Amino acid sequence: MDAALPTLTFEPHTINKPGDYVQNPVETFIVEHPGFTATVSEADFDNFEGQLADVTAFVTEHKQSLLTLSKVASRVSFCFDFGLESTLFSEDVWSESIRFPFQFLLLLAEVEADLEVSYYHPTPDEGEDADEDEE
């Protein structure tokens, strides 16, 4: 992966090498395979359509770099993780689903990328009073 990094047309904000110790709010682990993290969307957790548009634009713009990464000898795997706010905590919501257009899935398949959806518990909006219901 080291040889491929200078050829990237985007800037990773974290690069992990085998043996690196990683600690984040969710987990702690020792890196087994090389990889990196890059933020490709600034869309909020409640803006799936915005995230989808941003990731589609990113993959389209950087397709050649991603293809190069997928072909290096040590096979770098990468995943596009959609972070979404769960609606299951709403009073009348019994199920939750999202749908990815087949064109988007084909685009990810072209660059041999994985897809992940991470659901997060809703957080209060800024300025929202936690005691609002007590009035």
Image (spheres, rainbow, N blue to C red):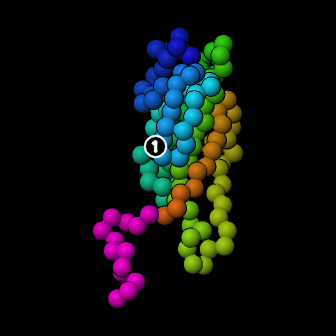
Q: Mark 1 points at which residue?
A: 41
User: Which quadrant of the structure image shows residue 65?
Assistant: top right
Instruction: Answer with left or right where residue 84 lies relative to residue 72.
Output: left
User: Who's the residue at 48% across and 51% down the image?
Assistant: 50
Give the prevailing secondary structure in the magenta stretch: loop
Q: Where is residue 51 in the image (x, y as percent from the top left)?
A: 50, 48
> As displayed, is residue 124 above or below residue 3?
below
Magenta-drawn stretch contains 107: no
Instruction: Answer with left or right where residue 131 lies relative to residue 51.
Output: left
User: Who's the residue at 40% across and 83% down the image?
Assistant: 133
Magenta-drawn stretch contains 131: yes
User: Who's the residue at 66% across and 20% down the image?
Assistant: 75
User: Who's the residue at 65% across and 16% down the image?
Assistant: 74
Q: Where is residue 96 in the image (x, y as percent from the top left)?
A: 65, 64
Of all residues shown, which one is farthest toward the left?
A: 127
Q: Nearer the viewer, residue 39 or 9?
A: 39
User: Is residue 69 visible to us here?
Assistant: yes
Instruction: Answer with left or right where residue 70 lies relative to residue 46.
Output: right
Q: Where is residue 43 in the image (x, y as percent from the top left)?
A: 44, 50
Segment colored magenta: 123-135
- SS class, disc 1: loop
Q: Nearer the viewer, residue 106 or 95?
A: 95
Q: Position of residue 1 (x, y in %)?
A: 56, 16
